[in-house]
Amino acid sequence: MITIGITGTLGAGKGTIVDYLVKEKGFVHYSVRAFITEEIKRRGLDVNRDTMAMVGNDLRAKHTPSYIVEELYKQASASGCNCIIESVRTPGEVEALRGKPSFYLFAVDAEPKVRYERAVLRGSETDHVSYETFIANEQREMDNSDPNKQNLKYCIEHADFRFDNGGSFEDLHRQVEEVLGQITYHRPSWDEYFMELANAASRRATCDRGRSGCVIVKDKQLLVTGYVGSPSGLPHCDEVGHLFRQTIDADGHISTHCVRTVHAEQNAICQAARRGIALDGATLYCRMTPCRTCAMLIINCGIKRVVCERKYHAGAESEELFRQAGIQLEFFHDEVQQYENQ
């Protein structure tokens, strides 16, 4: 799934790019503007540039600087389709989306007079203003030290691709088409690259109850790997079968686990200890939310970021431990892994 965020100056043509990607390329559209507009109407306010900025900033201040795009990304991720998140406007939003797999930020611009004329023709709730007000609105949103508030300058400067929409729509479409050609077969991000290595390690696992792998990385350098398997020298599940134990959680739910093997995260941390490799500030990549025991080891060895391919159905306790310990926990996909069996 490719996720494209779109930013740019007022009236530059963000909607034109969206229309092209939706109609010609099958992308699904999610709009920050529409999200805020719905909230404005819920509050019984008039929809205009001032209320757009006020309500958007209020939502970000009450939650997080990236709250709106995070909510939209949840919807986009659940769809499983290539998607567009339109009107990225704050540094917090850019940084949050940067951590998502296969994310690219597009920025579009054009001369102010051209943009104003297009905005007037568009005629949305926020476009019925004079040219002077149009420029003043843009300048107000162009730069701000508050991460909750609009900073178009920052967003544009940090875009992966920039488009000049001073010409025809056909010219803009051509520019977009060229970029799509570059990213369709994109280089994997660092997170994608290391998750692929973790999945490669999982093929060494010796228990079919959960063939998972793990890698631990620091400064983009691979430190250690691990996979599910029995302690050194002892028989593996694939050779002699599983060794089951039942546990009962606080809610009385009974779970059956194979206890013959050591988890991938534990094996990787053990390898680091044997080799004298410090893990302070490192990032751990694994298939799904680590169990409680693994989470405690991760916390104690100084790892500061955990990236999982998906959530584990019994991972809420570990998520809370990570939250309390200040460890950044991220997921490639929001869907929940219900069973350990593959």
Image: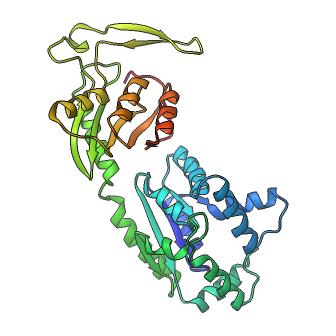
Coloration of the structure image: rainbow
Counting every numbered tag in the picture gives 0
Residue 162 rendering spot, x and y as whole percentages: 43, 76
Is 92 displayed left or right of 1 in the figure?
Answer: right
Is 42 displayed left or right of 239 in the figure?
Answer: right
Q: In which image quadrant can residue 60 be found?
A: bottom right
Tell me which residue sits at (71%, 87%) in the image.
Answer: 133
Q: In which image quadrant can residue 43 be found?
A: bottom right
Q: Quadrant of the C terminus?
A: top left
Q: Residue furthest right?
A: 44
Q: In which image quadrant can residue 302 be found?
A: top left
Tell me which residue sits at (48%, 32%) in the image.
Answer: 321
In this rendering, the answer to whether 37 lies above or below 315 is below
Is 28 displayed left or right of 162 in the figure?
Answer: right
Which residue is at the front of the view, 274 or 121? Answer: 274
Tell me which residue sits at (29%, 58%) in the image.
Answer: 187
In this rendering, the answer to whether 168 lies above or below 218 is below
Residue 197 rendering spot, x and y as whole percentages: 25, 41
Which residue is at the front of the view, 13 or 173? Answer: 13
In this rendering, the answer to whether 181 lies above or below 288 is below
Residue 83 rendering spot, x and y as whole percentages: 51, 56
